[in-house]
Image (cartoon, rainbow, N blue to C red):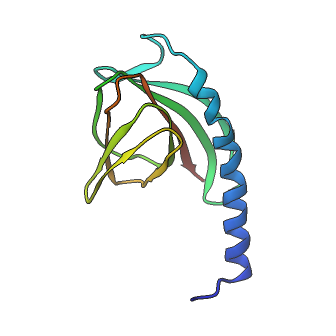
Amino acid sequence: MKTISRRSAIALGVTAATAVPLFATATLAKTKKYSANEGKEIAPGVRVVEVGTGNSDIPAYKSIALADVVFQPGATAPAMVMDNDMVCTITAGEFTIKKADKEFKLKVGDVYTCAKGKTDQATNTSKEVGIHRLAVLIPA
């Protein structure tokens, strides 16, 4: 096993400590009911609702923007190239995620990442409204 330097350990600790508060509020989205026309439509049955932004203590990122992507049952967000790195969590529904090299299923509480320049497609496979909470990492 490789050892990590003190600097790497501190960076990992700061990153983890910064990410925890972002997802501590994810449970709030589970109880939030969005109206059918709230936010901006990005595909049929898929809308983005901005939640908020904040400054980042992670050196590579100047800020973090939170958004909920609200999917009607069966709705699909088409494959898109990611503009930024993101950490995503499912706060309602169940999803199938397709990336260039893999496909996987997620349910409430599951977390995954999207990398800048990579393709991602999501489909709500549940019979309820599904919500992705995105933490978009804005570069410094």
Q: Position of residue 118 (x, y in %)?
A: 34, 54
Q: Position of residue 102 (x, y in %)?
A: 28, 57
Kindly identify the residue that appears in the image at 67 percent across and 75 percent down: 8
Residue nearer the viewer, 90 or 61: 90
Q: Is residue 95 left or right of residue 52?
A: left
Which quadrant of the view contains residue 42?
Answer: top left
Q: Is residue 11 left or right of residue 31?
A: right
Q: Position of residue 46 (x, y in %)?
A: 36, 24
Q: Quadrant of the N terminus?
A: bottom right
Kindly identify the residue that appears in the image at 36 percent across and 38 percent down: 95
In the figure, 33 relative to 54: above or below? Answer: above
Q: Position of residue 88 (x, y in %)?
A: 50, 44
Which quadrant of the view contains residue 12?
Answer: bottom right
Kindly identify the residue that appears in the image at 69 percent across and 68 percent down: 11
Residue nearer the viewer, 84 or 95: 95
Kindly identify the residue that appears in the image at 58 percent across and 35 percent down: 66
